[in-house]
């Protein structure tokens, strides 16, 4: 047994947590979390640190998750980690932005703010978060969730070998979330992006590349890790296909990456429009959805790791501290995340217009102020709510009009 005074054992098909301090309370976890990516692991870490009995259920580790692996300065701040402390992260010192035949390379290190972006392999980053959750007292159940069922006062979570019962259910199982499908409805195709590309092993760098595409409207990225680069392209699922994005990535690699061996990946990313974001219901009676399962990804940049972590933290605070945790969580998401994603979704169509891209590259080439805005956007430190005011101050009027048109935000 792992713990001298208690632990987790299986009675028949039921996973139980035994705690000799409360022998009558043999079976129930306070919270069952399905999925141990950043959202689930960070929720588990915060819940267990606050004294909750947590089961974190995920069979996939150790594994690489298809991802650029870009961890912004604000995500690092949430973790309380520097780039050196983030699992095997590369500190990025410059960014190259490309549109058609024009490009601009700019530093991504600020003399005052320091490093703005780390790139991590998700195998190490997610493994590290999982270990933090376990050290804080969460029980890691290395199983796949096959079903969830609402009982009178609790949830029953099925795995191939047993059942886990808990008062609360947190769905942290990514864009195809089984929990989401049981308590709500899956994402519509138009609310998903496809991301597809290659890990190119044997090459690395300290620079990220971002190339904006006109057709399909979206972008391609090359993010370096210590022993490989993750190259991929993304666009809305209803206007592209995996094969098209792979072909785009292959052409880019042929011109820009010298050598290396390729390993293909593709994966969906929630990229919700305004109406879908406004409709989201991320919680209900004793259940919460976090991270990708709740659609929490910036629809322009596709940054999701920060929102996964933040929603995990909100979920923990709501369950630990609020009588009506479901309502408190929904309010936290609405005020702290959905409001920002809705602003991004409103700007998205204009952002990816070729005309805006052209103006952006020109402005980046000539204006230090625009480069500062871009650096803050990459670091996650420029909110969409104050972007218009910030652009006014750069005096780049055409750029601002092209992006905002008649919009007030
Ligand atoms: C190609 C690509 C590039 C991206 N690049 C970036 C980037 O550079 N920066 C950034 O911030 N974001 C990026 N994102 C988005 C980011 O990867 C996600 O937003 C983030 O991983 C969401 O975290 P999560 O914990 O909600 O879900 P996930 O990381 O998807 O974790 C979900 C976990 O649930 C597990 N799971 C699923 N089903 C079950 C089940 N039935 N039972 C048990 N466990 C289950 C999975 O195995 C997984 O471990 C990218 C996404 C893609 C696809």
Image (cartoon, rainbow, N blue to C red):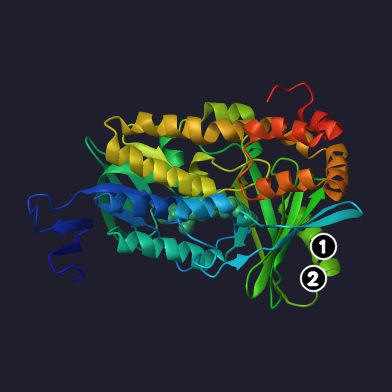
Residue 155 in the image: above or below residue 95: above
Residue 340 in the image: above or below residue 59: above
Q: Quadrant of residue 133?
A: bottom left
Q: Position of residue 255 (x, y in %)?
A: 86, 67
Q: Is residue 201 left or right of residue 335?
A: right
* Element at label 2: loop
Residue 189 circle label: none
Quadrant position of the N terminus in the picture: bottom left
Residue 221 in the image: above or below residue 312: below
- CA distance for labels 1 and 2: 8 Å
Q: Nearer the viewer, residue 356 or 242?
A: 356
Question: In terms of sequence position, does the residue under pointer 1 or pointer 2 come before the other?
Answer: 1
The residue sitting at 76% across, 28% down in the picture is 404
Q: Is residue 212 visible?
A: yes
Residue lying at the far front of the rendered structure: 112
The residue sitting at 35% across, 52% down in the picture is 44
The residue at which mark 2 appears reads as: 257
The residue at which mark 1 appears reads as: 252
* Element at label 1: helix
């Amino acid at each position: 047994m792992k713990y001298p005074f208690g632990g987790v054992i299986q009675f028949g098909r039921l996973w139980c947590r035994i705690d000799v301090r409360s022998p009558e309370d043999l079976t129930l976890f306070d919270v069952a979390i399905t999925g141990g990516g950043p959202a689930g692991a960070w929720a588990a870490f915060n819940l267990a640190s606050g004294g909750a009995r947590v089961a974190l259920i995920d069979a996939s580790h150790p594994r690489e998750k298809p991802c650029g692996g870009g961890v912004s300065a604000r995500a690092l701040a949430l973790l309380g980690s520097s780039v050196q402390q983030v699992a095997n992260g590369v500190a990025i010192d410059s960014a190259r932005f490309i549109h058609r035949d024009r490009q601009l390379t700019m530093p991504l290190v600020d003399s005052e703010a320091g490093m703005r972006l780390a790139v991590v392999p998700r195998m190490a980053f997610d493994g590290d978060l999982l270990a933090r959750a376990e050290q804080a007292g969460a029980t890691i159940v290395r199983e796949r969730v096959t079903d969830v069922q609402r009982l009178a006062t609790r949830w029953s979570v099925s795995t191939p070998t047993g059942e886990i019962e808990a008062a609360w259910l947190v769905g942290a199982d990514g864009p195809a979330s089984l929990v989401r499908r049981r308590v709500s409805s899956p994402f519509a195709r138009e609310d998903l992006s496809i991301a597809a590309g290659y890990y190119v092993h044997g090459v690395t760098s300290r620079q990220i590349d971002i190339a904006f595409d006109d057709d399909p409207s979206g972008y391609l990225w090359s993010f370096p890790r210590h022993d490989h680069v993750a190259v991929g392209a993304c666009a809305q699922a209803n206007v592209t296909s995996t094969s098209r994005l792979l072909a785009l990535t292959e052409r880019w690699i042929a011109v820009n990456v010298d050598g290396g061996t390729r390993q293909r990946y593709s994966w969906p990313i929630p990229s919700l429009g305004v109406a879908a974001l406004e409709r989201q219901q991320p919680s209900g009676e004793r259940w919460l959805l976090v991270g990708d399962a709740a659609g929490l990804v910036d629809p322009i940049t596709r940054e999701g790791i920060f929102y996964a972590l933040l929603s995990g933290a909100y979920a923990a605070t709501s369950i630990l501290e609020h009588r009506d945790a479901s309502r408190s969580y929904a309010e936290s998401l609405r005020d702290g995340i959905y409001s920002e994603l809705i602003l991004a979704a409103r700007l998205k169509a204009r952002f990816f217009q070729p005309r805006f891209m052209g103006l952006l590259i020109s402005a980046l080439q000539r204006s230090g102020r625009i480069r500062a805005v871009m650096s803050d956007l990459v670091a996650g430190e420029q909110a969409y709510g104050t972007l218009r005011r910030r652009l006014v101050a750069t005096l780049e009027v055409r750029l601002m009009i092209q992006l905002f048109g008649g919009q007030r935000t």
